[in-house]
Structures are given as C-alpha cells and as structure tokens.
Image: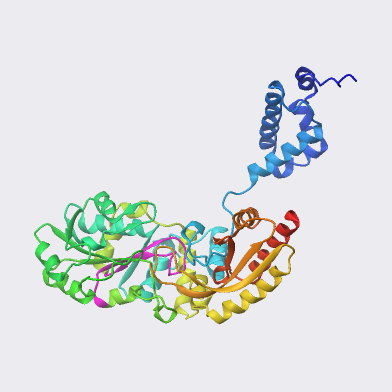
Amino acid sequence: MASQAQPKPSDALRRISSVDEMLSRPAIRALEPSAGRVLLVEVARDVLQALRDRLSSGQDAEFTDRDIEDQIREGIEAQLAPSLVPVINATGVVLHTNLGRAPLAREAVQRVAEVAGNYSNLEYDLAQGERGKRDDHTNRLLAKLVGSDSALVANNNAAAVFLALNTLAEGGEVIVSRGELIEIGGSFRIPDICAKSGAVLREVGTTNRTCLADYAAAINERTRLLLRVHPSNFRIVGFTERPALEEFVELGRRQNIPTMEDLGSGCLVDLEMQGLRDEPPAGRSIAAGVQVVTFSGDKLLGGPQAGIIAGGREPLQRIRKNPLFRALRVDKMTIAALEATARLYRSGRLDSIPALAMIRASVASIEARAARLSERLGMLPGMNAALEPGESVAGGGSTPGQSLPTTLVALGCARCSARELSERLRRNRPPVIARVERDRVLLDLRTVLDRDEEGEIVRAFERIAREIA
C-alpha cells in the first residue's frame, strides 16, 4: 500500500494567512479592546513568522487558522501577564527577603491606594498655602515612636547608613569594631558603604573581642564618628566582649565625637516574650544617647521598604541638607504606607501589623489552623497529611539562631515526589511557596495570612489532585 504523501513545506507556507487576514478574524478582533492594536499586530507578526520558520525547517507541516488564533491569544496573555504577583508564603519565614519581606497592614494598603490615585499635599503646606517638605508627614510620628528629636526616611537602610556616613564623616575616620563589619543581603558590606561614603574606616579590636579602650585608643584629630553596628544577621558566641551601649555613648560625649548605631532590623517593640532576644528596640538606643540611629522599615517594623534615620536635631538637620538626600528620598506611596504603619503603633494596634501578628501568634492558634487544613488536604485522593512540630523564623536578616515554635502540615503524595508537588504549587495562581524536607512538602500557617489564603491552598491541592489522578 502506497504511503500517503506528506505536504510540502512550500505548500504549507502558502496556506499561512497574512497578518491582515488574521487580524480580521472575529476571535482576534475580540482581543483588540484589551490588548490594543499595536501589541496585537506585533504578536500576530511574531506568531506567523515563527510558524514560517518552523515550516521552512521541515517542522509542523500540519496547522489550522484556529491553531494560529490560539497561539496569538497565548502570546497576548504572556505579554500582558504581570511579572510581579502576590504569592502565598507557607514557608514560616516571616520576613522572607525573596518574597518581599513584611506584608503591609490593610490600613497601609488603603492609604497607598488613596494617595497614589489622587493628587496629594506631598510637598505642599496646606496651612500656609506654600511649598512644604515631604518628610514632615513622617517626621513627628517616627520621632515619637522612638523618642528622638527628629526622623528622616531614605529608600532603604543601606541608603540611610550611606547618607549618615557621608554627611557626618566624609573625609574623616569612622571607628568601628572588627566584629561588626557585617555583610547584608546581596554581598553589600559595611566597609563598602563606608568607602563609597567618602569616610575612612578605622577598625579596632578583634572579631570576637572589642573593648572600650580599643575605641578610645583609636581616636585622633581625624575621627569624625563612632559607629556601632548591631549584628542583626549573625551571632558571635563564646569568648566575646563588646562595650555596653551606655559606655560607648559616654566615650563619644567625653571626646565630643558623635555616635551612630545601625540597628538594621528595625525593631520598635520588645519581642523577648515571643522568644526573639537580642533585638533591642530602636528607642533604647535613642534613650541611651546615641545621636544617630538607622534601621529598616520593611523588617521587624512591618512597614514598606525604607531606611529610617532617627536622632538628634543637629545631626539630622545636617543629613537633611545633604544633596544626596534628594537622590535617596522615598516617594509618596512609601510615605503613605509608613505613616499608616506608624499610626498603628501609636494607637497600640500591633496585631494589625501582619509581621508582628505572625511573630506574636501562639502555637495553639497555629496548631488549630493546621489541624483544620490537614484534615481537608488529607481527604484528597493521592494525598496524605499529618501534623508535626516545627520552627518558624523571623528571617530578613533578623534574629539569627532564634526560632518560633510552630505546627507544620506535612504532606506526601502517592503519585508524585515532594519536589514535583512543590513545583506544581509554585505554578498555581496564586503561587504557593512551601518548604521541602525529607521528600515531604511542609506548610507553616504562621505566615499564611488569613482564611482566604488557606482556602486558596486547598483549591491548589484540589487542582493538583485532579491533574495527577
């Protein structure tokens, strides 16, 4: 029996519709209101050219106009799909740097929407009817929270440290302990920030031991600043020594040299009752007399990405006048979110701040939620679920070596590996980010925001169960 003749590539190429012909088809015309004419033409050309290229190389000789329509529709969806999307954080890492650190409070989200969608008095003094300063909106609130004379906001804590060093120590020396020359995320190091600021780093002491006499011996006519860096992302234990904060401040006073502390994590309240020790609230440093304190807005503070500079009026006025302050300033949406977050602190509504609510959540409440979720997931075909004790962490370079007790939902799948199950969860919309350990997927509800997200997790597993059945 003779074999059926295959279509020649040249015959198939002649069957391809032109761009105009494809754009006139009803299914493609229906895409124009949402996609726009320009994008629609661009995607149609790309799809048709890709098809020609495949046919010319001897591939995919069979196709229909419906196939082309589907490819154009998929191309439009891919072009318009957002890259930055919300995810469900089931890892138990509260301040997950890769997942955007602290989620904002509802009040902060509402304030951002109100301000972003309208004109605002960002730099307008409503009382005087003249130009104002954008930092006035957060200055008093933040200063009240930490007990300082004044407060400024830069776009992140690295910028805050850089700005303070450049203002207070450019051309002079900054004395810092060798044990505090930390590296933060992204290979960003304190010595590098100091060098770029124009200040000269003067290292004293050793990695594990620095005493007050080491600082005092290094002071000379070029000394501009005494710098103390809180080890928020590491710990040195054992044979160690570090001057008390009060001693450090007193040395600066005696020598008439300003003192600065980089607290990094931005803790504003005492979290020792929750098991997070050695994270001093910024107010303690201000109360001890440190003249400039810097910390992050999107870590333990629970607000937007920002670098907060708090301290005395005179040094902050100098920092405010630095031309670099304009280059490193924040926008109206950050100010709106930070102001709303600060007001929640002022009114004592700490559990309205998601990061703090997660950290302060009891093991019993998490266990109750985990039990409900485990029961629902365990009923799905091919899935088995169990509860087990585990640990959550603050994350975000905060509270190293410390954890929060939690209850985990441990999941196994009869039809796929834990790694494949985790990949399928990441492909879900919204993506669900979980931990994988010992061929099991682990869900920690401490960082799952509410019942709506729990429902999304159930729906994700239901879809997966159907797909692998």
Quarter occupied by the N terminus: top right
Q: Position of residue 364 (x, y in %)?
A: 56, 81
**299 part of magenta stretch:** yes
The outermost residue toward the right is 1
Depth check, front residue: 455 or 251:
455
Depth check, front residue: 57 or 334:
57
Q: Position of residue 34 (x, y in %)?
A: 71, 45
Q: Is residue 338 visible?
A: yes
Residue 180 figure quarter: bottom left
Residue 41 figure quarter: top right
Q: Position of residue 283 (x, y in %)?
A: 33, 76
Residue 201 figure quarter: bottom left
Left or right of 422: which side holds 378?
Answer: right
Instruction: Give the residue drawn at x 38%, y 75%.
Output: 145
**181 part of magenta stretch:** no
Q: Is residue 132 visible?
A: no
Q: Is the residue 405 above or below the residue 456 in the image?
A: below
Left or right of 427: which side holds 164?
Answer: left
Q: Position of residue 219 (x, y in %)?
A: 11, 62
Instruction: Give the residue drawn at x 49%, y 56%.
Output: 98
> Which residues make up the magenta segment?
288-312
Left or right of 187: which side holds 75?
Answer: right
